[in-house]
Amino acid sequence: MDAQLLTELEKLLGAENVLYKAEDLLLYEYDGSVEVARPNCVVFPKDAGEVTALVALANRFQTPIVGRGAGTGLSGGALARTGGMLIVFSRMNRILHVDAENQRAVVQPGVVNADLSAAVVHLGLHFAPDPSSQKACTIGGNVSENSGGPHTLAYGVTTNHVVAMQIVLPTGELVRIGSSAVDAPGYDLTGLFVGSEGTLGLVTEVTVKLTRLPEETKTLLAIFDRVEDCTETVADITARGITPAACEMLDGWSLRAIEAYIHAGYPVDSAAVLLIDVDGLREAAAVQSEQVADVCRAHHAREVRLAKDTRERDLLWKGRKNAFAAVGRLSPSYYVQDGVIPRTKLPETLRRIEEIGKKYGFEIGNIFHAGDGNLHPIVPFDARDAEQFRRAVAASDEIIEFCVAAGGTITGEHGVGMEKDRLMPLMFSEAELELMKRIRNAFNPAGLLNPEKIFPASKGCGEIRSRPKRAVQEVGVA
Amino acid sequence: MSTPAAPGAVSRLEGIVSVGAFSAEPAKLAAYAVDGIAPSAAVRPGSPEEICEVVKFAAAENLAIIPCGARTKIGIGLAPRRYDIALDLTRLNQVVAYDPGDLTLSVEPGVLLHNLDRELGKHGQMLPLGAPFLASATVGGTIVSGVDGPLRQFYGTARDFVLGMEFVNGEGVAGKSGGRVVKNVTGYDLHKLMIGSLGTLGIVTRINFRTFPAPQEVRAFAVHFASAQDAAECRDAVAASALRPLTFEIASPAIANLFTRAAAFQAEPLPSGIFSPREWTLITSFAGTGAVLDRCESDLRKIVEAAGGSHFVRIGGGAAEKELSHVSAVITRLREFAPIALAASPACTIAKISVLPEHLEHALAAAKHAAEDHSLPWAAMARGLGVIYVALLPEERSEKAMNCVVASMNRIQEDCTRLEGHCTIPWCPLEWKSALKIWGPDRDDLPLMQKVKTVFDPRGIFAPGRFMGGI
């Protein structure tokens, strides 16, 4: 760590907002993924002016900079892969403006996702993207990763809910893109920046759409004795033109892990369940919940439970949203993938995942956003055993390759980051990646902002993976 | 101004594209004119590979290309700085993949929108673009021109349901982004940049969409309000209620005559009394089962009464063919507002305004005053989520009319800026373009857009000069 840079940082932010001692940096080596990377320093700016000044310093000292919210990300997006300065937005956590009439909110990037919804619930509104880590993850992180969540099935992902941003570019300029009113003229820069994984700019302010809360939500738990029945139900719900607000699948392995931890009331003796929300007007929710229940029964659901009150509903969802924390109690480490498949391919994909598990000697758990074909297969492994880790990665890669071959993609909501960069060639040719890289280089010409993310290292570099972390943090996953 | 390319260069194009895909006949080229400028050649390639070759050639020879489909919206944007090759995409007209079970669709840009609607309809599905010029528009042109439709109230715009695209960049290299699944964060969302880009970034060769189940039943309602303010108040009340309308449009009094007389739609006659010639008319529709629609109707009726609406009329809602056609006659005209207005005046000039919903009434008032102060006939259609199309309808295409229109539009644009909104002018007589601020005032993020343009089209051969800031 450059002593002069440190002096400048402390002068700019105050010593209490700059961390650089090894023991202080430890926490910031991790996010929610299995990746590890240590920054040289961690800084906590309080406003866009300070962020601009930090970027100017980084340019002067040629130090890499990486933005970070709560560090709940699942692809290493907020890790300082090449060291340098980690800019943590936890002090920029104010909701600047709520405009109920126009259904907009202007927030700083460090606002916690669930806090925003809680702040507007009395207005009958909420911020619709709901990653499972929503009690900790920040809007800035959601914007960078274009986060999803269970209810994005009906409501859309983060990009569908962001209309404008203030950004500090890696070159140090403070700019505004998009607008609070819809249809800002010109190229859709907001659409480009959302999901760019912190490689194009540092977000210092976000204008989001707020969504009216539905009049009624009904939560159903459909219990199946055969996994195939469960996956076929999902395909059939889609085919019949029913759009639930959420449609999550948990297999028996995951159910048992969750039940041991949360006591959500999941049936531990079943093969799989679907957790389904339908919402809207009272009349619409009533009809839809009947339609959904009928489809479940037609596919031999053993039982279809309807949560009878908010408490029961919240408990069912608490189980789902803490699923990964529950898995963490069972296995020293686990590797979660985020592949997406066309929804009709769900039954064959699950069969394939089981085969892959057998081949590599793992019992792979499955917690899916089934309604939109977004899979989260969990490969539990012991990170102390390097050979097991290699097998876990190999099994996960094989699942991802299957997803891509089925017409899907390598990541639905977690991002590429430093975890899946090597998988990018499965999706894009060299020329296609080159064009994306040129976009990055146009905004990030010196390559100081979030280096070595998204794009695979140049050829001939060999396969170097960072070591897995020692313990699993208790973080939720979308 | 158009710089004619060396004739030799353009004629060598013929050897690059497949037989019959090249034309340099003046009569044919005239049909490809953009803002009065005809190209030196037109090509109709049959594959993305052929497009790559054409673009590589054009890049090497520094020839300017404007891509086109059915050319229904080719007049949108500034006049091109130069224009050598018309790249006609209508031969790329295949549905590449349609998986009803997955609700995903992959099409080439030249597919006709109405053919696609029919194909999806067979499976009880739809693509909620609901865009104007439906009778002849292509999917590609609809996406790249960035037009919207009434269904955006419920489904959002193309940026919300385009899943990915393939395109050819300004160096003739094929690129892509996104994919064919409904959830995907792999790589940058370059396809979002293509929407509304007027072909200035790339030649789109494939578009992937998510499709939607078509509503089981649709019921529309019409209500009259004494003022735009009352109608806007009703909008606010609906937005604050549990109702989620499928469409929500407010029409100015002049629309009644405009729509009744619309010659192109006489096959679908408008039921009488829906649009008031003296008052503002709200048209809103809902989808769902009978019970849901009954509830929507009763809630809406209460809201409307409180907001001072009158002549509450239910359009359709029965299974009777006649009633269904009434809903269609009304929604079609709302969708086709721009072409209907364009046909109604020899010098129709249309502004597209976007403001926060609370400013709808202020923007409508600004439009009314700007038009009436210059004695210009006008009509406006406002969408509930904050978009207004204002058509100024001079009776003649004269210099005097131009001065009036320019003065009115300048004032509307100033007012929109004050309301923190936007006002662009997608349609106006060609010779008035240079007098109007087609793209509205300059935006602070224009330098970033220029960066994007340079990445995609480093030699500046795609539709040069047509986009905001002369991009």
Image (cartoon, rainbow, N blue to C red):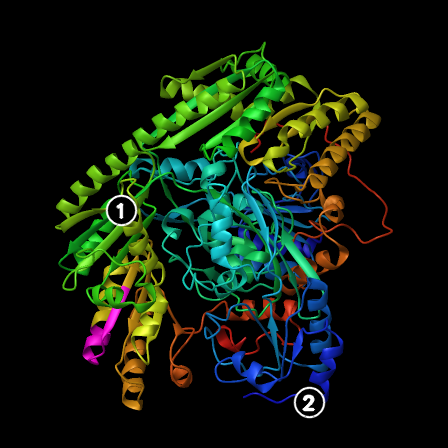
Q: Residues within 10 Å of mark 2 (few under 14, many from 20)?
A: few
Per the image, the residue denoted by label 1 is B323
Amino acid type for the residue under numbered disc 2: Pro
Residue A288, image x and y in percent?
Answer: 39, 28
Residues in magenta, as a range: B369-380
Location of the C terminus of chain A by quadrant is top right
**Tag nearer the camera, 2 or 1:** 1
Residue B465, image x and y in percent?
Answer: 54, 78
Q: Which SS class for mark 2? A: helix
The residue sitting at 75% across, 21% down in the picture is A362
Residue B284 lies, with reference to residue A123, above or below; the image says: below
In the image, is A377 to the left or to the right of A11?
Answer: right
- Earlier along the polypeptide chain: callout 2 or callout 1? 2
Per the image, the residue denoted by label 2 is B7
Residue B300, image x and y in percent?
Answer: 21, 42
Magenta-colored stretch includes residue B377? yes
Q: Is residue A40 visible?
A: yes
Amino acid type for the residue under numbered disc 1: Glu
